[in-house]
Amino acid sequence: MVLAAIVTGVILGGDALIARSVAAPDLTAYNQRITPDGRITYGPVEPVETPAEEWTPSPTEDETSDIPPVSTEPAESVAPSVPAVGNELITVTPEAAQDPAAADVVQLLTAYFTAINNHDYDAHQAQLTRAARAAMTRKEFTSGFRSTVDSEITLAGLSIARDGRMVAEVSFVSRQNAEDGPERQTCTRWTVGKFFEGQGTSLRIGKALSGSARYEAC
C-alpha cells in the first residue's frame, strides 16, 4: 500500500512537470500581433523612429521690428528732377531748364530785362555784342523804353538758329505809354528770339534775325 502511494506521487509529479514544460508561453512578453496579411505572430516590435523636426529659432523682438510692412498699394512714379534755374523775374519751362546753357542764359536775360525796367542804357549795352550795341544809340534807347516795364518773362526753349547761333525763345508782356507802344498799345504780349554769341569768356545778346519777333495786344 505504501508502494502504491509512492507510484501515484511519482506519476502526479511527472504530470505536473510535463504540464509546466508545455505551458503556453507568456503572449504579452512576445507582443502578440496581427500581421497585414491576417496571421497572428509574436515577437518584439522594433521601435519606429520618427524624423526629428528641424529647429528654427524664433525671431527676436529686435529682428521683427526691423522688418518693414509689405505695402499692397502701387508704387508712385517719380518724376525726373528739373534744375531750378529760374528766378523772381524769369520763369523757365522744364524743357528749357534741361539745357546745359539754361543757367547762363537766364543770368544774361535777367540783367537785360532789369536794365530795360530800370531804363539804364549803360547796363543794357553791357549785355549786348559790339554789333548789337552799335545798332542802338542812347537816344533811341531812351525814346523806345522810357516808359516800358517788362514782366511775365518766360524762357520757353533753347535751340540752334539757321545761322549757327544759339537762340532762346522768350515770351513776355510789356506795359508802356500809348505813344511808346507798337500801334499805340499800352499792353503788348511778345514772343521773340534772343540770339546769343560768345564774347571772350562771356555770353552776349547779338543782333536778331529778321522776323524773329511777333506781338499782339493784351
Image (tube, helix red, strand yellow):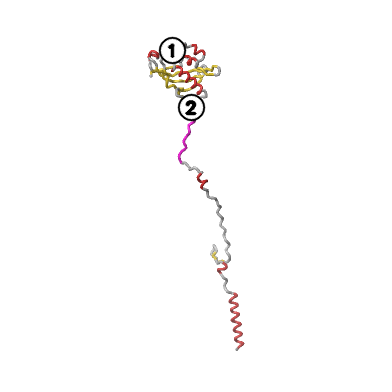
Q: Is residue 208 visible?
A: no
Task: Indicate the position of residue 197 as horizontal and vertical percent values.
Answer: 52, 17
Task: Indicate the position of residue 132 as horizontal and vertical percent values.
Answer: 49, 13
Residue 83 is labelled as: none
Where is 21 relative to 152, above or below? Answer: below
Q: Is residue 75 magenta?
A: yes
Which quadrant of the figure contains the N terminus? bottom right
Task: Indicate the position of residue 10 as horizontal and vertical percent values.
Answer: 61, 82
Specify the principal SS of the magenta part: loop
Q: Which residues are magenta?
A: 72-81
Q: Residue at x 50, y 45 (%)?
A: 65
Residue where numbered disc 1 is placed: 142
Report the amino acid beneath label 2. Answer: Ala
Of label 1 and label 2, which has the lower sequence position? 2
Residue where numbered disc 2 is placed: 84
Residue density around tag 2, few if under 14, some if 14–19, many if 20 or more, within 10 Å: few
Task: Indicate the position of residue 176 as horizontal and vertical percent values.
Answer: 39, 16
Q: CA distance from mark 1 to mark 2?
A: 34 Å
Provide the secondary structure element on which disc 2 rests.
loop
Camera-nearest label, 1 or 2:
1
Report the amino acid beneath label 1. Answer: Thr
Residue density around tag 1, few if under 14, some if 14–19, many if 20 or more, within 10 Å: some
Q: Residue at x 57, y 61 (%)?
A: 47
Is residue 113 or residue 156 the one in the foreground? 113
Is residue 191 or residue 124 the one in the foreground? 124
Q: Which picture quadrant has residue 140?
A: top left
Q: Is residue 76 visible?
A: yes
Q: Is residue 85 magenta?
A: no
